[in-house]
Amino acid sequence: MFKKIILIVTIFIVTGEIMIRIDEKFIFLSDTRIVKIATGVTTTPEFNLLNENKIDFSEKTLRIMVIGDSYIAGGGIELKDRFSQQLKLILKINNKIFDQIYVLDVSSPSSNSLDNSQTYFNYVDKFKPTFVILGYNLNDVEGNLEIQRNKVDMSNFNPAKTNSHVNESFTKKLYNLYKKSKFLDFILHKLHNELKAHGIIVPNSVFDLILKSYYQDKENWEKSKLLLKELAVDTKEKNIQLIVLKFPEINLLEYPELFVKPEKTISDFFKLLPFVKYVNGSELFNGGNSKDYILSKYDGHPNEKAHKKMATEIARFITVKAHGGNKGYKQ
Amino acid sequence: MLFNSLNFAIFLPIVFILYWFSTKRNLRLQNILLLVSSYFFYACWDWRFMFLLIFSTLLDYFSGIKIHEATNQRKKLFWLWLSIGINLGFLGVFKYFNFFAASFADGLSLLGMKANLGSLQVILPVGISFYTFHGLSYVIDLYKNRIKPERNFINYSVFVSFFPLLVAGPIERATHLLPQILKKREFDYSKVVDGLRQILWGLFKKIVIADNCAEYANTIFNNSADYSGSTLVLGALFFTFQIYCDFSGYSDIAIGTAHLFGIDLLRNFAFPYFSCDIAEFWRRWHISLSSWFKDYLYIPLGGSKGGMWMKIRNTFIIFLVSGFWHGANWTFIVWGFLNALYMLPSIVFKTNRNNLDIVVKGNYLPTLKDFFTIGITFSLTVFAWIFFRAASVSHALSYISEIFSSSLFTIPEFIGKTSVKTILLLTLFLLVTEWIQRNKQHALHFSEGSTFKSYFIVLFSSIIIWTIILLGAFGNKTFIYFQF
């Protein structure tokens, strides 16, 4: 009986290992999945106007630049429902003094603090914004945050030969199998996602490491802070109002305790930069039900309703600041 | 609670373990557990409709006893019609009121009169058409003296609300299900394994085929004006497999789940797309509903005993009622009418009972003639599904007129997409598997065999499980037949 069970489990695992590898190679249903979670860059009218030098830079125009990753870009939702478009609409409704309102959305999926900083410096002098909105995401500390000035020539690089395959212990063999197994990788990934959706963060999982990078292993956060500070100081020097909108993990609204430490760290940092308007997105959704604002329970991307909520809040601040009062503000 | 949800994946093992291991195989305890679980299962949809379910159960329970105890025919008839009237009344209010009000207003407007009858803002209680038909079959069978009334309310309630069949059938008969509820059930390992395999095949059909086909069927049907005739044919084909895999997938999960509790439910699908004529198709599609209409409507109307015209009239009546049962929309009625038309030649030429046996019995491959007849029947079915899926009759007509235009001869859109090729390949896999297993109760029904065969079954099941995991369209998509 025991032998039979072992054999059945082995058949199941081996079949899984093979099928996962085949699926990864051919990506069978890739194009339908892309439709569902599209995170591509869609150019907004302002982007084309900028390229055609048709932006009016006079004081009678309000120019807003949006930077950040797919959270603020609006991955998975229609262009008209995305943060920048909803913001423009609300601002236009409340506009009393400007001839024209431009919202240049140069946010880009998968960007981190370094990418956001580079985007800002690429466009700031061309677009001359009045306001810059930085959509800050917890995972902006991930990835490379240093500009490599001296690239190493890898063409003649030969890695040293290891002798790991010689005299391998059984435990080591098992460990290597675990590292190479697509089956385990897949199962663990699914398991982490499912547990995460229920507010349980697996120690040393990617998300756990992101959270910890704000208060434990702070190397990337330190680098990120330098980039953010550089950007913020530049906005101050250029008399631009910087608004930092810290995006919440929308699917985890019911578990605010997970984010207490990183959010305090981020908030404390921006307190040192009083000229920056810092908006903690999590607070906008206090008491809210994540089901109303998610695209998927496994994913923190906000839906169109959440985009509208955040756009309304930011538009209120901009309107008050630009008009010098909030009388007759409409949402 | 959907069969294809995590909630059900947790719910089912818990009920299974409690059922077999905590009730000491005590029938009364098992039935109480089934009833509580069934009500919990139903309450997960909307607890408010529980009261409607309980009321309907109480109504038929007491009517049944009264029918049996009635001393004369008039009293029997009174209780029978009271039950039928109230049951159909609920169905009418919840399902058809808005349709009748709108159709009546439309009719008056054609005569130049205006009527504002308003509309009811009510949600259709899930499964109402199914449990109403359970109850009706019970009181009618009692009236016809086919069964004795069940005086134990718990047992009767389990018959009406047994969770695997509660929301989308199969539509059970008291003569078939009630005796099983009253009989002590023993744990049967092979039955449980077979049940699990049927659940697996049902999940494959629903999550992999139906929900992936739905992506394209919905896109094409919802924007049909933008697509060429050939793409619309592709859309109709996607819907053809979506509806089959969605509903038969549900039935497979329901029947497989019932097996886990030692209960056999009526077969609902018998590989209908391999039918050689329309009459055979209707003996293989939604069998529990077709036989319900046959026994409780077609035969009482005179069936086929009153000559050709009566046979034709009765056929049209049951197909129109069947269409209307599916939903309060003219599209379903046209769909029913179309199927009745399809049946006409076989009634006139008395060929409707030509294909009663397994398709191409004894051969692996169909002959050219079989292939041709299967193809014709399938094409007629696809054509009728266009009405079933369209938003309105005019939508269906414009859809069909675009199909029969010159754009039919263009290359369909989406055909080059990897996902479309994958879905078509998976559908082919489904058809091949079902063709090989067409003489079995379901596609994963295997008889005991050699060790090699048992490991082959493990390998095949593993492939199906992994296909579901890797290629399934997850997201707790509801089953189409819940709306009926």
Image (cartoon, rainbow, N blue to C red):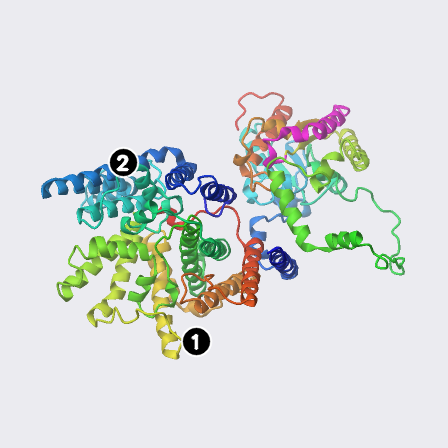
Q: Residue at 58% across / 45% down in the picture?
A: A76
Q: Above or below — where is A153 with respect to B163?
A: below
Q: Above or below — where is B429 with respect to B263?
A: below
Q: Chain of mark 2?
A: B
Front-lying residue, B222 or A62: B222
Q: Position of residue B253 (x, y in %)?
A: 44, 52
In magenta segment, residue B35: no
Mark 1 residue element: loop
Q: Residue at 20% across / 57% down in the picture?
A: B298
What's the residue type where badge 1 is placed?
Leu
Mark 2 residue element: helix
Q: Position of residue B120 (x, y in %)?
A: 30, 36
Q: In this figure, what is the number of numbered marks?
A: 2
Magenta stretch, overall SS: helix
What's the magenta region?
A249-275
Q: Residues within 10 Å of mark 2 (few under 14, many from 20)?
A: some
Q: Which residue is mark 2?
A: B58
In magenta segment, residue A267: yes
**Residues marked 1 and 2 touching at CB (< 8 Å):** no
Q: Position of residue A304 (x, y in %)?
A: 54, 38
Tell me the distance, in whole angstroms, between the alpha carbons under discs 1 and 2.
52 Å
Q: Position of residue B163 (x, y in %)?
A: 39, 44
* Residue B119 visible to an observer of this rendering: no
On whether disc 1 and disc 2 are found on a single subunit, the reply is yes
Q: Which residue is mark 1?
A: B365
Closer to the eye: label 1 or 2: 2
Task: Please give left or right for residue B208 compared with residue B134 in the image.
Answer: right
Q: Residues within 10 Å of mark 1 (few under 14, many from 20)?
A: few
